[in-house]
Image (spheres, grey):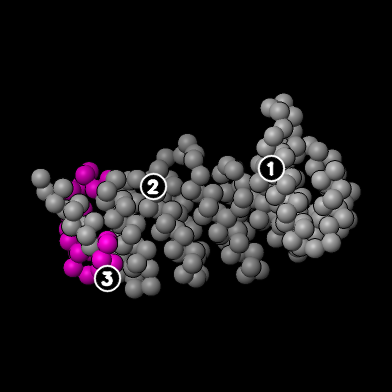
């Protein structure tokens, strides 16, 4: 019934509400039932681009494995709206499986909008729980940083690195303290990582923190950095 309402939706706001409703209903399915199968059984026959785009995005949020190959095919659809919907779907996926697809779009697409959306989705998926080594995650974030052409994506990378609790991540973030455009985010990330992993190399960590104290304009950060230096010196 909700699918039928979506097919007949007359406005973008109605479609958005119905997308959310579909996701909410899908979450209530029993373990052996598949909401994606219901959508996949109908999506091929839908001709309206906006309706199909809505269902593609819903499939991404639900994130059942059988939907991923279908979403991959829509990445090369002749309809630009369908391609963007597929990028959104993979960006909202609940697991990191679409990482390679999004990275390839961010790396090689000739469409700037596609590149930006895919890169943001890639950075988001890097933050999801996975079994890969943490240092590998740092390398993947650095790959994203190389592709980032504007400040927003670079800030996203630094925010992501601040949650990878390794010395390598700390050392990486510190290198961006010399970038005036990224310094505020780098300062926050450096302090967060210092709290988590600074004890592994206290001499270097305290040196970084003292530099932060002397140079930052963030008064709260300055207070927290001082407290951490005192704690690490005991």
- Label 3: few (<14), some or many (≥20) within 10 Å? few
In the rendered image, which residue does mark 3 sit on? 217
Q: Position of residue 138 (x, y in %)?
A: 41, 50
Residues drawn in magenta: 197-221
In the rendered image, which residue does mark 1 sit on? 24
Q: Main secondary structure of the magenta part?
A: helix
Q: Is residue 152 left or right of residue 21?
A: left
Query: Is the residue 73 above or below the residue 78 in the image?
Result: above
Q: Position of residue 24 (x, y in %)?
A: 69, 42
Viewer-nearest of discs 2 and 1 = 1
Q: Which image quadrant is residue 49 in?
A: bottom right
Q: Secondary structure at mark 2?
A: loop
Q: Of marks 2 and 3, which one's residue comes earlier in the chain?
A: 2
How far apart are labels 2 and 3 at the CA level?
25 Å
Q: Residue at x 40, y 43 (%)?
A: 134
Q: Secondary structure at mark 3?
A: loop
Q: Position of residue 95 (x, y in %)?
A: 58, 42
The N terminus: image quadrant: top right
Q: Residue at x 22, y 60 (%)?
A: 223
Q: Residue at x 47, y 36 (%)?
A: 131
In the rendered image, which residue does mark 2 sit on? 164
């Amino acid at each position: 019934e909700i699918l039928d309402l979506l097919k007949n939706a007359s406005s973008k706001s109605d479609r958005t509400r119905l997308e959310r409703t579909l996701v909410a209903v899908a979450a209530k399915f029993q373990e052996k039932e598949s909401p994606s199968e219901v959508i996949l059984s109908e999506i091929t026959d839908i001709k309206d681009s906006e309706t199909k785009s809505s269902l593609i995005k819903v499939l991404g949020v639900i994130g059942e494995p059988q939907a991923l190959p279908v979403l991959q095919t829509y990445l090369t659809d002749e309809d630009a709206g369908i391609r963007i919907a597929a990028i959104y779907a993979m960006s909202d996926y609940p697991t990191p499986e679409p990482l390679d697809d999004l990275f390839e779009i961010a790396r090689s697409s000739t469409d700037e909008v596609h590149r930006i959306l895919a890169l943001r989705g890639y950075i988001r998926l890097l933050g999801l729980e996975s079994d890969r080594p943490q240092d590998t995650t740092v390398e993947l974030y650095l790959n994203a940083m190389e592709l980032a052409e504007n400040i927003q994506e670079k800030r996203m990378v630094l925010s992501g690195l601040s949650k990878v609790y390794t010395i390598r991540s700390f050392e990486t973030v510190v290198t961006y303290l010399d970038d005036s455009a990224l310094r505020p985010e780098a300062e926050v990330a450096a302090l967060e990582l210092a709290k988590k992993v600074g004890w592994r190399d206290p001499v270097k960590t305290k040196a970084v923190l003292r530099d932060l104290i002397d140079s930052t304009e963030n008064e709260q950060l300055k207070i927290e950095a001082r407290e951490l230096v005192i704690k690490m010196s005991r």
